[in-house]
Image (cartoon, rainbow, N blue to C red):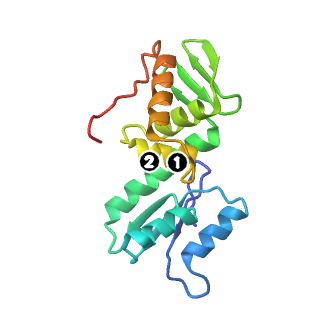
Amino acid sequence: MALYQGGVAPLIADVMMPTMDGFTMVKEMRAAGFEQPVLMLTAKTTIIDKTTGFTSGADDYLTKPVDLAELKLRVAALLRRAKINSARQITIGQTILNEENFTLTINGHSTTLAKKEFLLLFTLLSYPNKIFTQAQLLDQIWGIDSASTEDTVKTHVSKVRKLLKDSNDVKITTIRGL
């Protein structure tokens, strides 16, 4: 485990280890309440392996051989997201999203959000400039087994956009075709 002066210690785990494979280790750690960021670093490259890695609880997955510059970038991104998650609040300019009470505060005016609206906005703000498909958001927020459709995502994005209308700090942009 690497130490970081900001108080977050990311775990970099290999899949192929002598006593227990990394997938099992991460799954058991998550079940035990371990919330630190985990990066799988492995020679296993198939989509099945990557799916297993992410579903076991890994936050990122990098295959060998490793470009050291990319590894540093990924660890920095994990630490940034872990800082956001541990703060349980995201502040961008005059826009504040607070997980403790599910509030969105814009220029000093607070609104309590519905759970799915909050989770949608928290996900989007936790990964600035990342492109999410409707299917990804549906799986991540409503769950893979949900009966909800991509129309549900569209409806919630529309509601969140309306809530953000007074924010000069946060905008949700749709990229057609993705």
Seen at 57% across and 62% down, the residue is 57
Q: Is residue 158 above or below residue 60?
A: above
Seen at 57% across and 60% down, the residue is 3
Helix, strand or loop at label 2? It is: helix
Residue extending farthest to the right is: 32
Say few, some or many: other residues with alpha carbon within 10 Å of mark 2 (under 14 / 14 to 19 / 20 or more): some
Percent x, y for residue 29? 67, 66
Percent x, y for residue 63? 37, 70
Q: Is residue 168 above or below residue 33?
A: above
The residue at which mark 1 appears reads as 140
Q: Which numbered disc covers residue 82?
A: none
Residue extending farthest to the bottom is: 18
The quadrant in which the C terminus is found is top left
Query: Which quadrant would residue 116 be assigned to in this image?
Result: top right
The residue at which mark 2 appears reads as 136
Percent x, y for residue 75? 45, 56
Helix, strand or loop at label 1? It is: helix
Say few, some or many: other residues with alpha carbon within 10 Å of mark 1 (under 14 / 14 to 19 / 20 or more): few
2 and 1 marks in contact (CB < 8 Å): yes
Query: Which quadrant would residue 89 be assigned to in this image?
Result: top right
